[in-house]
Image (cartoon, grey):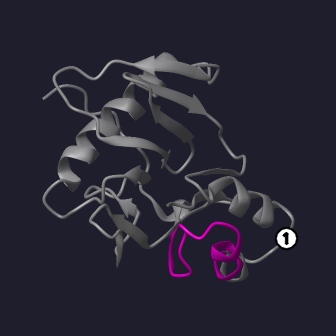
Amino acid sequence: MTAIVYHQGKLMGDRKNALFTNPVTFIDAPKVFISEDKMFAFGISGKTVSVENKPRYEEIIRKIIETMTLSGTDRKALDQIVEIDDVQIDFTHGIICTKTQQFLIQDIGKVYVRRFDGGTHGCGTGGAIAAAMLRCGVTPTETYRRLPKIDHMSGVKFDIIDTSKLKAFVIKGDK
């Protein structure tokens, strides 16, 4: 139901969001976002991110980035479980990007984070397929045009965020 991909400094996500009604219906809504402070971008699968709940996601994601940055001062922190106290996580997986770092996140009861700086990576039902096409030289437009023929739950419309235009990430810590 999602094709979120990081490739060559760009975070991309399709816009086909499923509403689990009977029958299932789909709406057009973004899956990739830039934080309010413009220091990070993220794409998550699972629940559709609304204007009302975006600040909560940003708070969770900021804590993940800070934890991975502080524990990886030697840039060797690859995999880690990040404890998020008193916050319900309702995404299944996603990709987080700062100007210089990229992480795959997965909710496994706790938040599992894997660093993959610079590599191409995808998540969601169509993410791995889209990542493979992009690695083989297919353009983003052509990738998302072809993708629904392979993964009918991913959409043709997509958004791109150029992570090189993000501000440098600054650790704010606890307020």
Residue name at image x 59 percent, y 19 percent = 77
Q: Quadrant of the C terminus?
A: top left
* SS type, badge 1: loop
Residue 51, percent from left and from top: 18, 64
Residue 47 at what x, y percent from top left? Answer: 31, 53
Which residue shows up at 58% across the image and 30% down it?
114
x%, y% of residue 53? 17, 53
Q: Position of residue 33 (x, y in %)?
A: 37, 62
Residue at left 68%, top 75%?
140
**Was residue 158 drawn as part of the magenta stretch in this picture?**
yes
* Left or right of residue 53: residue 5: right
Classify residue 90 by image quadrant. Answer: top left
Give the residue type that dot 1 points to.
Answer: Gly
The residue that mark 1 highlights is 137
Residue 165 vs residue 137, the one in the foreground? 137
- Residue numbers of the magenta segment: 144-161
Whether residue 118 is visible here, answered yes or no, is yes
